[in-house]
């Protein structure tokens, strides 16, 4: 994915260089040190998952899979120029909505059974995300520019049930309320007469295990879970 994104940027940049010079929109944008805006977008969230090594012998787990599902996000954008137009610091406090689905297949303990036991557990999150990213942007080509991002974020899961009483009749997966993630990505920027519009793609992955083991039927076969998210955002700055 990183290679495809980089190749796309190079192709677009080459095409832009080949274009004839055009009148510049929003000429003074890069002269300002600080810019504000807003962001709207959608995401697909998932887990990097690790079942226990002896999950089959101990619990009859045949397979464990994590399914990604769609969510959305909205945020406030602050961009600080670090002495040069091509290096900036971007802070985007974000409210995001995410859902992940863990799918289980257990061996049926009934010797006469012809089918295994299937089950799913949905893990929902409403996060306050605080990403801090370095933005490395190309010089402006007419009314167009591209950039790469690298940084990290802290996430607070407002919907986390880490302190909730577990239901052993209808058990659920617990994940930690706090998480730290690394992020990489890139984007395209288009300058209109009075604002700048951007399309951005990012990938984030947790540094630490977010899983809480509480010895229920659905949690015992699992060793570790790490949050991972693909983000697509539409950014407007003035």
Image: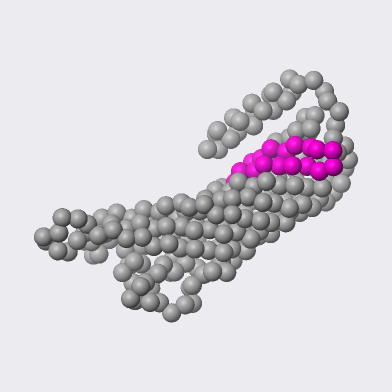
Q: Position of residue 81 (x, y in %)?
A: 80, 47
| Residue found at x 32% / y 58% | 104
Left of 182 or right of it: where is 30?
right
| Residue found at x 39% / y 58% | 102
Front-lying residue, 116 or 150: 116
Total count of labels: 0
- Image position of 13 with respect to 155: above or below: above
Whether residue 229 is visible here, answered yes or no, is no
| Residue found at x 82% / y 23% | 21
On whether residue 199 falls in the magenta region, the answer is yes
Colouring scheme applied when the structure was drawn: one colour
The quadrant where residue 111 appears: bottom left
- Image position of 21 with respect to 115: above or below: above
Secondary structure, magenta segment, majority class:
strand
In the displayed image of the protein, which residue is found farthest to the bottom? 165
Q: Position of residue 229 (x, y in %)?
A: 53, 52
| Residue found at x 29% / y 54% | 63
On whether residue 155 falls in the magenta region, the answer is no
- Image position of 66 with respect to 189: above or below: below
Whether residue 43 is visible here, answered yes or no, is yes
Front-lying residue, 19 or 203: 19
Left of 141 or right of it: where is 218?
left
Front-lying residue, 238 or 221: 238
Q: Which residues are magenta?
A: 186-202
Q: Position of residue 90 (x, y in %)?
A: 72, 51
The quadrant where residue 180 appears: bottom right
Left of 36 or right of it: where is 205?
left
């Amino acid at each position: 994915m990183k290679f495809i994104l980089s190749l796309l940027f190079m192709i677009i940049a080459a095409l832009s260089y080949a274009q004839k010079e055009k009148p510049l929109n929003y000429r003074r944008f890069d002269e300002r040190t600080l810019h504000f805006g807003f962001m709207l977008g959608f995401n697909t969230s998932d887990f990097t998952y690790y079942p226990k090594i002896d999950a089959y012998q101990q619990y009859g787990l045949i397979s464990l899979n994590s399914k990604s599902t769609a969510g959305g996000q909205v945020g406030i954008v602050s961009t600080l120029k670090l002495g040069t137009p091509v290096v900036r610091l971007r802070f985007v406090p974000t409210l995001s909505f995410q859902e992940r689905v863990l799918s289980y297949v257990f061996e049926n303990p009934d010797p006469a059974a012809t089918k295994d036991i299937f089950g799913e557990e949905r893990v929902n999150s409403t996060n306050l995300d605080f990403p801090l990213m370095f933005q490395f942007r190309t010089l402006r080509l007419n009314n167009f520019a591209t950039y790469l991002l690298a940084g990290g974020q802290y996430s607070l899961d407002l919907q986390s049930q880490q302190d909730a009483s577990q239901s052993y009749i209808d058990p659920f997966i617990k994940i930690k309320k706090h998480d730290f993630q690394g992020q990489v990505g890139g984007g395209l920027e288009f300058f209109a007469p009075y604002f700048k519009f951007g399309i951005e793609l990012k990938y984030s992955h947790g540094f630490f295990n977010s899983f809480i083991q509480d010895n229920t039927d659905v949690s015992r076969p699992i060793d570790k879970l790490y949050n991972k998210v693909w983000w697509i955002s539409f950014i407007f700055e003035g």
